[in-house]
Amino acid sequence: MHTPLHRRTFAAMAFIAAAAGAAPHLALAQASLPPLQLGVGMFQPDREKNDATYRPLAAYLASQLGRPVQLRTVDSWEGLAKSLANGETDMALMGPWGYVLANHEAGAQVVSTILYDGKPEYHAIIITHPKSGIQTLSDLKGRTFAFGDKGSTSGYLIPRHHFMTLGINPDAYFSKVLHTKHQAIETQVTQGVLDAGADYDRNRNAMIEQGLIKAEQSRIIWTSAPLPNDAFAVSKALAADKAFVTRLQAALSGVGAALASQPQLLPAHYTGFVVRDNSFYKPIRDAGLATGNLKAR
C-alpha cells in the first residue's frame, strides 16, 4: 500500500529536520527566511580575529533560532549603531553608548546584557604612565590625552561627561586630544607616547592577562561608577516580533550553560547573558543628554 504523496513529503521533511538536529518547523524557517545579520563591534585587535572570536556565537544562535545568522564586524561603535539603525544589521552585540544611540535614533531595543565574570556591569577608567608625574585629573592640564571613538561609552562619553562635571573642556584643557581604539590607548600610554587616556577596566585587565602590556607600566587615576555591560540589541522591526524576542532571550540565557561544553562561544571571562531592558541603560542615556551628545525628545 502506497503512502499518500502529501504524507510522504511531510515525512521526508521531518527526516531532514531530524537529521539536522532541528524541529521540522525550524528547518522550514531556515529554508524560507533570509539570514539574520549579526553585527559585532571591534572587540579584538583586528577584523580577522574578531570574526573568528564571534563566529561560534553566530552559529550557536542559528542553531537555537532555526535560522541562518551571518556575522559582520563593524569597525567602530558609532558605525555599529548606525548599521543597526539603517537596517544593515538585525541584531548587534554593542557597547552601551552605541546601543543608546541606536535606541534613541531608530528604536533598537536591548534584549540581554552580557556578563563578565558573572557581572552585568563594568567601569570606565583613566590611565597614565607612572613616570608622567600625573597624580590626579587636575594634573592633566596641558598634557596629551586620548579618548576612544565617539561611539564608545568608557572611552568617550563617560569620561567626557565627568570632565564636564568638573568644569573641564577637554578641547581647551589638553595640549592635544586624540580619538583612537582602546588597545592603542593602553599601548601608547604604557610607551609614554601619550600622557593619559580613557579606557575600561575589562580591556586593561585582558591586555595585561594576554601579555600585551605590563600592569606596572600604567596607573589608574580615575574610576567611574558601575556602568551596564555591552548590550545584545535587535532592530525596531525585530523588537516588534515578541515571539522572536522571547526565543532569542532564551537562546542567549542558555549560553552560560552551553559554555561548559562549548567554551569557544564567548571570549575569556565572559560567562553568558542576562535579560535586561532599556531602563538598565539609563545612566548612559542621562550622560548623553547631559553632554548634549543626545538630543532630548
Image (cartoon, grey):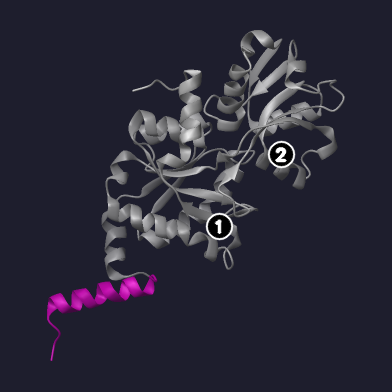
Write the residue at 62% across / 25% down. Answer: 159
**Which image quarter: residue 137?**
top right
- Spot the residue most to the bottom: 1
Point 32% across, 45% down: residue: 239
Chain part drawn in magenta: 1-21
**Residue type (three-letter) at the residue carrying disc 2:** Arg
Mark 2 crowdedness (10 Å alpha carbons): few <14, some 14-19, many ≥20: many
In the depicted view, which residue is nearer to us: 195 or 284? 284
Residue 9: say if magenta: yes
Task: Indicate whether residue 264 is drawn in magenta.
Answer: no
Q: Secondary structure at mark 2?
A: helix
Q: Nearer the viewer, mark 1 or mark 2?
A: 2
Residue sitting at 85 percent across and 20 percent down? 133
Instruction: Answer left or right for 40 relative to 197.
Output: left
Q: At x 72% / y 43%, what residue is drawn?
A: 205
Q: Residue 265: which numbered mark, if any?
A: 1
**Image position, residue 154 (x, y; %):** 60, 32
- Residue 64: x, y in percent? 40, 62
Judge by depth and name the residue closer to the eye, 193 or 217: 217
- Check the picture and name the quadrant holding the C terminus: top left
Q: Position of residue 265 (x, y in %)?
A: 55, 57
Using residue 254 as the reference point, say whether residue 28 is left or right of it.
left
Q: Main secondary structure of the magenta part?
A: helix
Q: Residue 289 location in percent, x, y?
A: 45, 23
How far is the residue under mark 1 from the one under mark 2?
A: 22 Å
Residue where numbered disc 2 is placed: 204
